[in-house]
Amino acid sequence: MHTERLLLGPGPSNPYPEVYEAFTRPVIGHLDPVFLGLLDETQDMLRRVFRTKNALTLPVSATGSAGMEACVVNLVEPGDKVIIGVNGVFGGRMCEVAERAGAEVIRIDFPWGQAVDPQALLDAQKQNPEARFVGVVHAETSVGVRSDIAPLRALQQTDTMLLVDCVTSLGGSELLIDEWGVDAAYSGTQKCLGVPPGLSPVTFSERAVKRSTEGRTKPVQSWYLDVGLIGAYVGSGRKYHHTAPVSMVYALHAGLKRVLDEGLENCWARHQRVSDMLHQEMAKLGFTPFAQEGHRLAQLNTFFLPEGLDDAGTRKRLLEEYNIEVGGGLGDVAGKIWRVGLMAQGAQERSVATLIGALNQILG
Amino acid sequence: MHTERLLLGPGPSNPYPEVYEAFTRPVIGHLDPVFLGLLDETQDMLRRVFRTKNALTLPVSATGSAGMEACVVNLVEPGDKVIIGVNGVFGGRMCEVAERAGAEVIRIDFPWGQAVDPQALLDAQKQNPEARFVGVVHAETSVGVRSDIAPLRALQQTDTMLLVDCVTSLGGSELLIDEWGVDAAYSGTQKCLGVPPGLSPVTFSERAVKRSTEGRTKPVQSWYLDVGLIGAYVGSGRKYHHTAPVSMVYALHAGLKRVLDEGLENCWARHQRVSDMLHQEMAKLGFTPFAQEGHRLAQLNTFFLPEGLDDAGTRKRLLEEYNIEVGGGLGDVAGKIWRVGLMAQGAQERSVATLIGALNQILG
């Protein structure tokens, strides 16, 4: 018996139907010309959803956290300074990954629920012009907050690069890698691309590529995540590195095609429209927004629970009786907030109707 | 239009039909009790195919090379000595991964086509009793050679651990992790388990777990591959680490079930039977075995080409006209040998009939 859920948590989201179909495609070799053609198309489509011309744009063969690690270990060497803005779990994770790579981390904390202030990061960079990168999470999944990236374009005038976590933003809300001057970014497949978890799309600007290859004194500490080696396979060299996860690439190809067929901006607009509907309906049930106004993610909505609502018990009933998953809070806000994801296939009016209908039955 | 191939190269192999079916299973959350139950079953089945009781036995969320890196970075710290036997590409890769992790590598080379001599590794360990591990590739995919692991059980009497690459052996030929005294091993899904590439099953003995957690002075350099953190999610703690690649776990679960339903020893025997048939038939066409007698892998058969045979041209015709993939040689033996994989779904008499039939048409 297979369990089926409406996935309205922080991810994975429900895949687009085309993606399941792609998984039935016969596996072929990772050096087969047909597969390499499909990989080229996947890279082209990734460039379109990232809004970039970066040659080094590819899916890392592991989940989003490995994409984070790939970006970090390719950009830093032991002893390098980095500046990281933290307003939730994933900013904190970036600090830990950087520390393990031997970096000296200048961590700038912001209250959970608030956006990262780009000016504070720029100020920190002025005091530490030798910093290798400024890192920030565009869409903090742990709190449902969108931080402004565009002002950080000013880093292009410095020797400090801009690293952005786009795990939850890619495909779900405006993201403009080239226009915002992002040097390195990573994402995941299991959020707004409507693909199961398993790959991490990354993109590197020319100066990020330079830094990660000829700009180093020692090889990248991770052989598996060395983008120079990965790029030599995925790019025109076709030099064998590791065996590409063929079926997951099929799935990503299908998810990207679906997003681009709908139109990237239409896709962003759909996520916003459905989120607006959710907020209206949740307000009627006494849920109030947690994230800072003007910085709320459409694809990941956070709410304070109404007075007296049983957090774990209600989520358990939603899951067991209604097959609906919503996310609870993490860390300091555990038990205090819910995280309601409306991503990819889940970002449709029916999802809101289903959740609200179930909540009315449980709470009513 | 979807391309379909008979995959008789070094991997990926053709997945078992049950595995494609598993991919259509609806995606659910990585913390969903139903998924966690499935993950438990997957771990249990992995223990059965690895022939181990190791608690820390799990699929790393990336391909086989990441499993190699996971084993290495969890066991070593910068400055540690390690001893690695090399008789092909993958032994060489283990050296590179260890060097990037800061290890001092004592590399012991053996001629390509020959097995690694366990006594030479034991002798090296006697001269370097502080070595953290002895590493060896059980089934060298680049040359089709099986090395003896059992004699290395003697390392259990020392402080040096035994690390074994089982990428191509797991599920395809005898592999006895506990009986052979293996401390850490990694594999891939895309060979004899009949699952697409994307996950790397690993297993750690108690002393390997101890070394990778409390036995260290610094955290593991890779956050993503830290088996302590992964084990806290996959094990009973259920502490969120990264988003598990849900669909790939479904696929692995199905592949393992198929292998165990057939019976692990029956599965090994099938690979051997079909390989014997291949050798008989290839001999008639003038192909002679490359790998050392007594150390030939059933699942990955290597042959010197007959005098005058056009390597690339023939493989191209097999691929384009017959949709059959066979592998060429790597490195020093490029252009001189073929690698014919008979793995998982491909390890059946029909594969041999198909390949030989096509070769007769092309060469005849």
Image (cartoon, coloured by chain):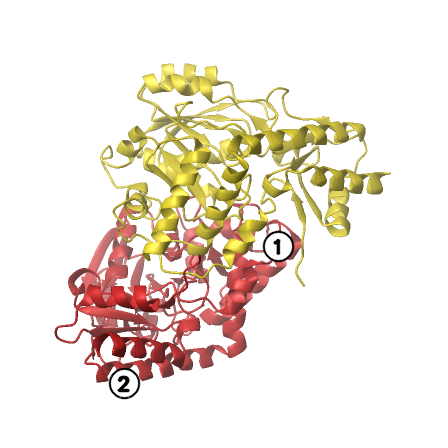
Chain colours: A red, B yellow
Tell me, yes or no, whether the two marked residues, 2 and 1, touch with CB atoms within 8 Å.
no
Report the residue marked by disc 2: A280
Residue A172: x, y in percent?
40, 73
Q: Chain of mark 2?
A: A
Image position of B197 with respect to A89: above or below: above
Mark 2 vs 1, N-terminal side: 1
Q: Residue at coordinates 32% horizontally, 29% vertically from top-left?
A: B80
Of residues A41 and A79, the one nearer the viewer is A41
Q: Quadrant of residue A87?
A: bottom left
Which three-letter amino acid code belongs to the residue tagged 2?
A: Gln
A258 left or right of B5?
left
Q: Quadrant of the N terminus of chain B?
A: bottom right
Residue A26 marker? 1
In the depicted view, which residue is nearer to us: B39 or B70? Answer: B39
- Res A348 visible: yes
> Residue A338, percent across and down?
23, 69
Local SS, label 2: helix
**Separation of marks 2 and 1 at Cα, in angstroms:** 45 Å
| Residue displayed at 23% across by 63% down | A86
Q: Position of residue A77 (x, y in %)?
A: 33, 47
Q: Residue B329, located in which quarter of the rendered image?
A: top right
